[in-house]
Amino acid sequence: MKQKFGKNERLCSPRLIGRVFQRGSTEVHTFYLFPFRVLYIYEKDTPPPFPQVLFSVPKKQFKKAVDRNLIRRRCKESYRLNKEPLLSSPPGERPSYIAFLYLAKEITTYDVIETAMKQTLKKLGKLPSALLKIQTDNS
């Protein structure tokens, strides 16, 4: 599989971004894994062929755009190279929309970001089976 991060894998739609960041919504799930907070949504009806991903670095924490862009580039690169565990699961069982929020107070090295991204993607790849069982039991 080609290791690209194309336009169809980026979360760009303002409506979908609003859904991911909606407070108090029951469809948005979240977990923390340093240096990320991960928000994700499962699309029940027609999931996209690839998960759509968003990377966010706070302007309040990193005043210079150069620093924010550096962190965002490192996050995107680690996602691009390590997204295989997430893509191996079928489209209906993996998150459709994912937002990675960078929480660290300082600029971390690529190695730290890559290790956290690998763990995060592995966790996202394994989550659906347990989560879908819970949702079907409640129905």
Image (spheres, rainbow, N blue to C red):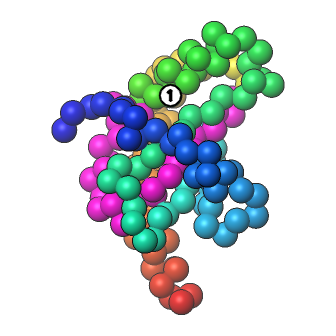
Task: Say left or right for 22 vs 49.
Answer: right
| Element under disc 1 | helix
Q: Would residue 89 be counted in the magenta stretch?
A: yes
Magenta segment: 79-104
For the point 76% across and 58% down, the residue is 23
Q: In which quarter of the image is the C terminus?
A: bottom right
On screen, residue 23 above or below 116: below
For the point 51% across and 42% down, the residue is 11
Q: Could you tell me if residue 39 is visible in this image?
A: no
Task: Say left or right for 24 vs 48.
Answer: right
Which of the 4 image quarters holds residue 63? top right
The image shows residue 98 at horizontal and vertical percentages of: 52, 48
* Outermost right residue: 60
On screen, residue 100 above or below 71: below
Q: Name the residue under label 1.
A: 75
Amino acid type indicated by mark 1: Cys
The image shows residue 61 at horizontal and vertical percentages of: 77, 23
Q: Quadrant of the N terminus?
A: top left
Which of the 4 image quarters holds residue 19? bottom right
Task: Say left or right for 35 vs 82.
Answer: right
For the point 63% across and 38% down, the residue is 101
Q: Could you tell me if residue 103 is visible in this image?
A: yes
